Amino acid sequence: MTAQAPQQSRRGGTASRRAERASAPLIQERYITREIPLYELISEEGVELLHEQSMTILEEIGIEFRDEPALKLWREAGADVRDQRVRIPRELLLEKLALTPAEYTQHARNPDRNVVIGGRNTVFAPVYGSPFVRGFDNERRYGTLEDLRNFIKLTYMTPVLHHSGGVICEPVDVPVPKRHLEIVYSHIKFSDKPFMGMVTTPERAADTVKLAGILFGETFMDSHTVLTSVVNCNSPMVWDATMLGSLACYARANQAVLVTPFIMAGAMAPASTAGAIAQLNAEVVAGIAYAQLVRPGAPMVYGNFVTTVSMQSGAPMVGTPEPAMMIYVTAQLARKYKLPLRTGGMLNGSKIADAQAAYESMATMLPTLYAGANFVLHSAGWLEAGLAAGYGKFMMDADQIAMLQRFSGNLDLSEEARAMEAIREVGPGGHYLGCAHTQRNFKTAFYTSQLADNNSYEQWEAEGGRDLNVRATEKAKQVLARYEAPPLDPALDEALLAFIAKRKAELPNTVT
Amino acid sequence: MTAQAPQQSRRGGTASRRAERASAPLIQERYITREIPLYELISEEGVELLHEQSMTILEEIGIEFRDEPALKLWREAGADVRDQRVRIPRELLLEKLALTPAEYTQHARNPDRNVVIGGRNTVFAPVYGSPFVRGFDNERRYGTLEDLRNFIKLTYMTPVLHHSGGVICEPVDVPVPKRHLEIVYSHIKFSDKPFMGMVTTPERAADTVKLAGILFGETFMDSHTVLTSVVNCNSPMVWDATMLGSLACYARANQAVLVTPFIMAGAMAPASTAGAIAQLNAEVVAGIAYAQLVRPGAPMVYGNFVTTVSMQSGAPMVGTPEPAMMIYVTAQLARKYKLPLRTGGMLNGSKIADAQAAYESMATMLPTLYAGANFVLHSAGWLEAGLAAGYGKFMMDADQIAMLQRFSGNLDLSEEARAMEAIREVGPGGHYLGCAHTQRNFKTAFYTSQLADNNSYEQWEAEGGRDLNVRATEKAKQVLARYEAPPLDPALDEALLAFIAKRKAELPNTVT
């Protein structure tokens, strides 16, 4: 495509204008700094009530840390440790929690892509962990390394996504023990946005830290955060050795983690919204407090991923009222603790990018924004309760995020925006299409989607009567065709590849 | 269907249980009384700034009332009237506006269906005014009287829709001069929920008032509101004789009207969100103040319908950031004036009930709820920027409204909901599926959609791999098959039909 562009522009006309637009420099949007108010769903008293309940859970029932080093640290800190059960006095817990920074900068290899996670900021990252892909012909199949790289490239090319994410889809064609190396390298090589580390074993977390050390320098990395990874609690109330090992690995290296219970309320938490919140809050704060035992001051994010369970079928449900409430209330709790917040996303249970997918995605994402989430995983591409990453879904979600970004700037009340001059000029019965104010403002006045079809029925039909998923998948192809890799210092690239080659030689091809 | 039900139940098994569910009495939901906070997008100072601008517009530029009786009333009230231009001093305007009740009850022929419009209440009504229909085979065609009646029946059968609406789709098979009679009669006959009056000419408004008078009694009607109709301002800043005539007809009869500028910002209002709000606010308050000149104390609703115009194609756009801002800020203005608010809906520009339709619908409807709308027209069925009413879209929108209804109850923080007993009982590493608290709560704990598919991919595929629109359209057929008309006093029915026959004989078959 790039090679062809000069040829096209010589031809002139529509094709040339298209080529011009296609080669326009990509202006990365700054992460969202919200100018809109937070939506506080419940009262401060309600927040206190749930906080108190979480404290009682941790003091009286306790939480399991199924990891000897973790138990040792808790014992040394003064918690009541019996077998793997840790009971944490609230004073100890809150003291440790308070060591966590309220916000932190995650550095990218291109400093213009650094993101500040916390405060009034919201950073969007793509879907994470999907074994399946909805491909360019809407086919459903296992993800491959090429798919992962495509999604990394699409994220790089999408100005309103600020973070490259992690395991966007599983590269099933790469052996599990070596997969983490390919994933991390792909983020470094094909994007210059910040990215996530691997967590499937502590050793893979360590490999991620090594690769990041090569890229950023180990000294820089010890005082600067360059990774934000995600670990999940085994709800109810169990932190297992794999997750704790990865969490400790990152905390020791001063790297950030989204400490995230993955809750299916009704199965892994009580069959009630408030009860589920109280439990997940206990799980999060225990996890973050543990990270502070490992390294005081390590940046950690209050995470949650909330679904409810259908009591008829056992299936997880999202986009329903209760997860929205959980998003809002956990945000209020995170603010109480002065912790950055990860929640929400474009979640849905639909198998295809149809109306169900979109209703549920928006019914999750609007609360995510209004609640004040700081880091949003699964912002683009999510389908099938996370089992599939869709190219079409990715593009349509990104379009919606662009609108949220615009909305988050709040209403412009400047004199120019109030347009009194135009109202005087046009007067009753006129129209604004040609007036001076419109001439000055029409290009930026209103968000115009490149994916939504607002044409007449007849024109839409004449253009093939395509639904949004078809148009969006087509757009994904077009964007990928324009992709050019950001430059990477060849010496660094060589060093990264050398480390990967060495590790690959050491690692088996199958999990033993 | 009803006739077949006893046969089915004799068979036993699944079919019998289905029939049992099908014949379960329909429990109408009470209209929403919001227990959630309002989302106040801008500051009080911002609201004041826009209010001041609207007052300046009405005082200095003025607004046109293209209707001699209206000009006469404004002259008598002390406004500055030159030709058709009326300049209204703010003291006069605010004095008249203050006569409007902050809330009112719209009575239904079944008193259990009465709705209170205003305050913390939200009342949902279906789509209005679509010439086209997306039918049971997803075909697009002109609407018919049968379609209108189907939508009235579906609305009647849908517990979370509280209001029967008006011209849900245009019954194109009925001659225009007689259409209003068939529409009003259909609402009275096939539903017992409150409904809207006709506004296409003042004479048709008068016929509506007559029909309502037969149904409710003229004396009752003079002191009770039984109609909520809708009139549109010809933006910018023109109220025409047709709309003013209908508005005056209803106001005189003590009947409510949604006084609604229909704004395509960039064409009929400035190409800026704040400017468009200032203008539409001036249009609304002038219209409502006029209604108070006709009859002080007549119930009126602060209405708006807001879209932006694509500066590339001239097409209207909804579900984008600017209409959401307009919804929030006009809500703040309506509250300042202590007026009930009509805004929002499930608006979208998509030709089919695909992901675009759903994203845009939710991106409009969530702000509608959070802003505190009291009356929501176009809550179910809207497609194609209002040009088509869809059966599938109707059902899927209703499902979403059920979820909003649930959300609007806010978080239950009772002891039972906090579920401490369950958390103690289950403990770390357990699961909640069988515990006592779950047994008590599983039926009502979490909203379970009857339309969303949350099954496995394999099960979904085995069941035909149907998208939401296909499933929802199927559901519409099933619900209609169960419909039974609410009883209507035969004497009243006869009187209504006699009036309609008389009027039909007087009216031509074509507009002359």
Image (cartoon, coloured by chain):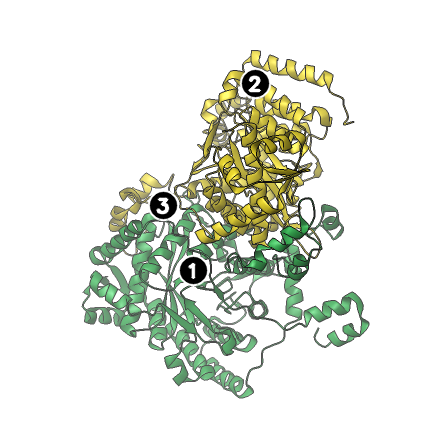
Chain colours: A yellow, B green
- The residue under label 2 is A213
Q: In the rendered image of this protein, does residue B317 appear above or below residue A497?
A: below
Q: Earlier in the sequence, mark 2 or mark 3?
A: 2
Q: Nearer the viewer, residue B222 or A500?
A: A500
Tell me if residue B355 can be seen: no
Pointer 3 chain: A
SS for callout 2? helix
Q: Depth check: B176 or A82 in front?
A: A82
Question: Residue B485: which numbered mark, if any?
Answer: none
Measured from the top left, where is residue A458 in percent x and y?
A: 54, 50
Q: Position of residue A133 (x, y in %)?
A: 67, 37
**Which residue does the image show at 51% across and 52% down from the upper left?**
B362
Q: Nearer the viewer, residue B226 or A82?
A: A82
Q: Which residue is mark 3?
A: A411
For disc 2, the neighbor class at 10 Å (few under 14, some 14 to 19, many from 20) is some
Question: Which element carries disc 3, helix, strand or loop?
Answer: loop
Q: Amino acid at mark 2?
A: Gly
Residue picked out by circle 1: B373
Label 1, secondary structure: give it: loop
| Nearest to viewer (mark 2 / mark 3) | 2
Label 1: chain? B
Q: Quadrant of the C terminus of chain A?
A: top right
The numbered mark 2 sits on a residue in which chain?
A: A
Kind of residue at disc 1: Ala
Q: Position of residue A250 (x, y in %)?
A: 58, 27
Identify the image quadrant of residue A338: top left
